[in-house]
Amino acid sequence: MFGRTFRDQDWPLLIVALVLCILGVLQIYSATVATKWQDAWWKQIVWILSGLVMMWIVSNMDYHVLMNRIVYLYGACVLALIATLVIGNKVFGSTRWIGVGGLKLQTSEFVKIILILLLAKLLTDWKLDTLEWRDLGKLAAVVAIPMALVMKEPDLGTSLTYIPILICSVLMAGLRWKYLLILSGILLVTLPIGYHFLKPYQKDRLVSFIYPDRDPKGTGFQVIQSKIAVGNGGMWGRGAKESSQTHLGFLPVPHTDFIFSSFAEEHGFVGVVIALVLYFLLIMQVVQNAQTATDRAGLYICMAVAALLLFHVLVNVGMVVGRMPVTGIPLPLMSSGGSNTWSVFLMLGLVNSVRLRRFVN
Amino acid sequence: MSILETERRRDEELSPERLLHDDPKPAAGKVAVFQYLSVAVFVFLISGFWKLQVQNPDVYSEAAERNRIKSTPLLAPRGKILDRDGRVIVDNKASYSLLLNRDQIKWEHLPAIADAMHLDYDELARKIRRMGSSPQIIIKDQLTRDEIAFVESHRDSSSYPEMDLIRAWRRQYPQDGFAAHVVGYVGEISESELDSPAFIDYRQGDLIGKDGLEREYDTRLRGIDGQERVLVDNMGRERQMETQKEAVPGKDLQTTLDLDLQAVAELAMEGKRGAVVALNPQNGEVLAMVSRPAFDPNKFTGRISRSDWTEIAEDKYKPLLNRAIQAQLAPGSTFKPIMAIAGLESGVIDDKTEFHCSGGASFYGHYFACHLKQGHGAISVHRAIAQSCDVFFYNVGNRLGIDRIAHYADLAGIGRKTGIDLPNETQGTMPSTKWKLRMSRQKWYAGETISVAIGQGAVTVSPLQIVSALGGLGVGGEWYKPHLVRTDKPVLLRKANFNPDNWQDVLSGMCAVVNEGGTGRAAQLPGITICGKTGTAQVAATERTKGAKLKSDLANNAWFVAFGPKENPEIAVVALFENGQESYNAVPIVRDILKAYFDKKARMLHPEVTQAQPAIARMLLSIPVMGDLQAAGLRGLSR
């Protein structure tokens, strides 16, 4: 049993993920030398190693078993979110973390896994070829509850990450393209109009209401500094620890949300392409596992994970080059932080679990 | 698991319903769509990096450079201005200036900054709009303690990160306008100057010499500003020194001025209007130069306030005018020695030629009076100079004609700039037939010559011109270019080959002015033969018609020019006492300076006397020393 699982592990997925983790740790180290976060790099190593253990455990569990218990997990997760709001640690004006035996965990990160499994479970149980509005409404309600709780923290960025999980799952389960068109049409029309009706100061207020801590020097400061850092990297980069934007503090949070900005300044366009290709390979490997999954549940799980990772990379890296708004979601595997690292490894464990079960039955 | 059970499960799994609803294959197309979408996302992201990092990395590396490097100018102190003995006339004092960094300027901060700095907001705003590409601009010099405190406190709290304090040098001039016209003043470069190609090296906010030596020798006096480049972090905290280019201080300017003489001249002119120039006729070195009324250059240094400026600029006596080189006034009788040499050299008179003065004479149908109503009787050139007989010189002038007068006057430098190293010297007027044709397209009338012969009419000079002219005459007809900054080689402008007898006749006449009971007898000095010539000049007729209100403003100007010793003149002095009524009012001014000069010389030549015998020393040391000068109200002289 162990021998086979060891051999059948998704080694390409694991290797790509570990290379990205190593890049992340090196970058965290470089960006935080002689700052108050200078021990973040070894903490990140601890997170990664413990995340690998979790991934291995989840890999060896049958995802059907998890899916069968998902209702309880979902309930526990909603309770945990409420608990976070009630007793959580308030940092930078938002309550996202809950203390668990000395660890501070961001509950909203783990909601992603619950939602992935829950949607897979519901969609497979319903055994539908096409989804009707009624079904969509039910699924949306299921996602909306944790989403609303996370928004309340407030943490708009993380709550938004639940949407790609939902969209990808329902698409895979047979959402009609017509529905998709209608939905995206409504979205496209209402969003700009709604935003347009806001007065400039309201737009600014909206931004600073959601992120009171993130805009201390005027709107767009972080994006400007991030773009300067990226541009300053040029083709070949400034070299590790040589980056002025990162080391003189112009770049905000260079080891967490803006780690890729710092990476781009130090390693240039060449480094950026290498890292992005690794992310592409990672996502494609997850998709490959979806394609080889023996059942729809496996497919849903893998595709939801792939969509979530793609969304994270798009929003985080897009923010770094100024092509996405600043939402403050981390870059999977590279950004410093325990909850996200664990959650990504747990998701990769789910993918691996799907892979390892393709020969079962 | 039994075989049977396995069989049943397999049947279940292979049942059509199960296949229909749990077969992932129908989703394959959607998975492919997701793959294409992923490719699109990554292309989108990479193109973002391509645009920033490959297409225009310079824009961003410069922005990063601007972020992290703060460069502040290290202002170079201007050179000091020294007297001939190396004593300091103009010095620098360290002060603080407020500088704004362009990149960080926020318009909403400006009203508060202008308010705290006591500046006019509109002026400040205009200046900042004009700053162009310069990274910083100095907006206020000589900050007071309160202003420094404001900057310090608001910079530390990062509320006004655009502000920076830099050490600057405040020009320190002697007080009460001492030598103000000679040294001039510095001021902020004007907008029109900035636009001119001559000031290409200057930037907005630079200080530049505006007048006097400060302006003439600006390039020598001004140093080269250095630059300090400091690595700063996002809070504007200085992390480490990147590079430092030291400022190169400006070169000191050693002038030919003698502070002792200058002090005496200043004191002698106290409360008067006019000018004094003392120079060495043998090389043109200017020893003292005073113009009154004066202004306080300290008010101008840096950024003068509007009210101070209008007060000075609109004063009717024009304190900014350097009368020593810019006044254009009738020389009066000081012109007569030139007439005498012209008459003798051209042969229209000799030393025996006598004219009869009955208190006036008629020429061309006009009666011209002599200043002595009862007349001088029969008079020759020697006594005519000594007694300043007008009728004698009317006749000489009549015989010479205007063009011969103009020839000799031009030789002496009347009607042309001396070329002194000060800005805006005027050239005065020496009329001639050609000059009149050029100026008014009219013929010269012989009657006009008669006035010119006694230094009235169209002829005008500056004090410097007349002292240079007569001083050059005193040394036998050699005119050196007057200058204020020491040079190794004096410039000989013109040399005349006078018949020594003729020259001696004029010299002895001028000697008699002082030593034989002439009009300048008050200038006598024991042991030293002084020669000179007085002048009482009428204020030009145009001034009268211009409607000067005060009667005193129309009073005659008093002149006295003297040099000595007669055998080898080494100092020539002119005093112009505007509206001084009678020439003898100008004589004591010159005498003070001559006495101070020769006393100082004696003291230098015989230091043992001054040390060993205090009584004699006191006699010799009759020039006022610094303590006395200060007691006399002439403060801020020197350290």
Image (cartoon, coloured by chain):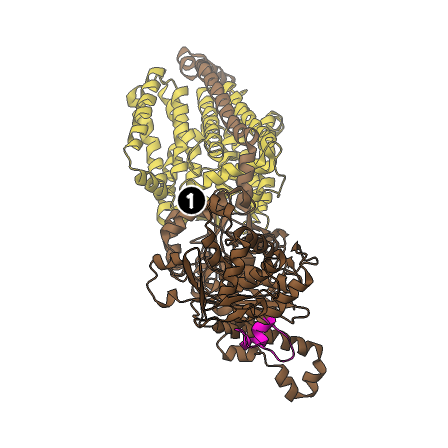
- Amino acid type shown at disc 1: Arg
Name the side, left or right, on which A155 lies relative to B356. Answer: left
Q: Quadrant location of residue A211? A: top left
Parent chain of label 1: B
Q: Residue at the location (56% across, 60% down)? A: B339
Of residues B380 and B409, which is closer to you in this image? B380
Q: Please determine whether, in this image, residue B590 is positioned above or below residue B332.
A: below
Which residue was labeled with disc 1? B129
Which chain, by letter, is yellow?
A: A
The answer to whether residue B266 is left or right of residue A186 is right
Q: Quadrant of residue A311?
A: top left
* Res A218 quadrant in image: top left
Q: Is residue B502 visible?
A: yes
The residue under the point 48% across, 36% down is: A343
| Residue B524 belongs to the span the image colors magenta | yes
Residue A338: x and y in percent read: 51, 42
The quadrant of the picture occupied by the C terminus of chain B is: bottom right
Instruction: Look at the image and say whether residue B370 sits in the magenta stretch.
Output: no
Q: Which residues are magenta?
A: B511-531
- Vertical comparison of B349 with A309: above or below: below
Q: Residues within 10 Å of mark 1 (few under 14, many from 20)?
A: few
Provide the letter of the chain coloured brown.
B
